[in-house]
Image (cartoon, rainbow, N blue to C red):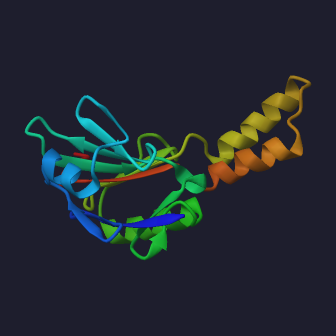
Amino acid sequence: METAELIPLSGIQIQDKTIALSSTRREVEALLGAPYSSHKNSLYYFQNEVRFDFDTNDRLNFIEFLAGIDGQLQPQIYGVPAFQIEADDLFDILSAQNNGEINDCEHGYSYAFLNISVGIYRSRTPQAVEYMIEDAEDDGEPMDEEDIALELRQAAHWATIGIGIANYYK
């Protein structure tokens, strides 16, 4: 497992390399080599676990870690492992660092911390898993314990975390 340090409003440190937000596409490729894959204005590295998005001027404006708790690349932010720490604990840390408005329009599935340009996402919440369990029981097809444990584990952690340039989420 490899780690990377996210530095909000600045960039990331990974494999002894610093990649600054606002770097050019060429600078990113010079540091990391050829991408694993690419799509339009995005480059993907580390077996598609990290996405680098570029604006129309080919300047890096967003970096997102995509693999969640089971990924081979584990990002850290403010000294904590973003995917390994409990979702509520990371939310509290990011809220304190943000010290201002948080976009919570997706009601627990994602948050954008506007002052620090950090976004987090998960595909399920603990409450959604509870509803899923109840619905399965109501349908006469209860979930097995292994599936419930997997769903609850994923709901308890963030699946993605991204950092953007200032005002990225505004």
Closer to the camera in the image, 88 or 16:
16
Residue 154 point in image, percent of width and height: 65, 49
| Left or right of residue 57, residue 50 in this image | right
Query: Which quadrant holds the N terminus?
Result: bottom right
Say if 100 sits above or below 43 in the image: below
Q: Considering only vertical position in the picture, is 69 above or below 136?
A: below
Residue furthest toward the right? 140
**Which is nearer the eye, 98 or 164?**
164
Q: Residue at x 74, y 47 (%)?
A: 150
For the C terminus, give its image quadrant. Answer: top left
**Quadrant of res 143:** top right
Residue 13, image x, y percentages: 31, 67
Residue farthest to the top, as pictured: 139
Residue farthest along the left direction in this orientation: 57
Which image quarter: residue 41?
top left
Residue 158 in sight in this render = no
Residue at the spot 73% in from the left edge and 37% down from the top edge: 131
Left or right position of 73 against 7 = right
- In the rendered view, tell whether residue 73 sits above or below residue 96: above
Relative horizontal placement of residue 43, taking residue 46 as reference (left or right): left
- Residue at position x 43%, y 43% in the image: 48
Q: Position of residue 4 (x, y in %)?
A: 40, 65
Residue 55 shown left or right of residue 111 in the figure: left
Coordinates of residue 68 in the picture (x, y in percent)? 54, 52
Q: Is residue 51 visible?
A: yes
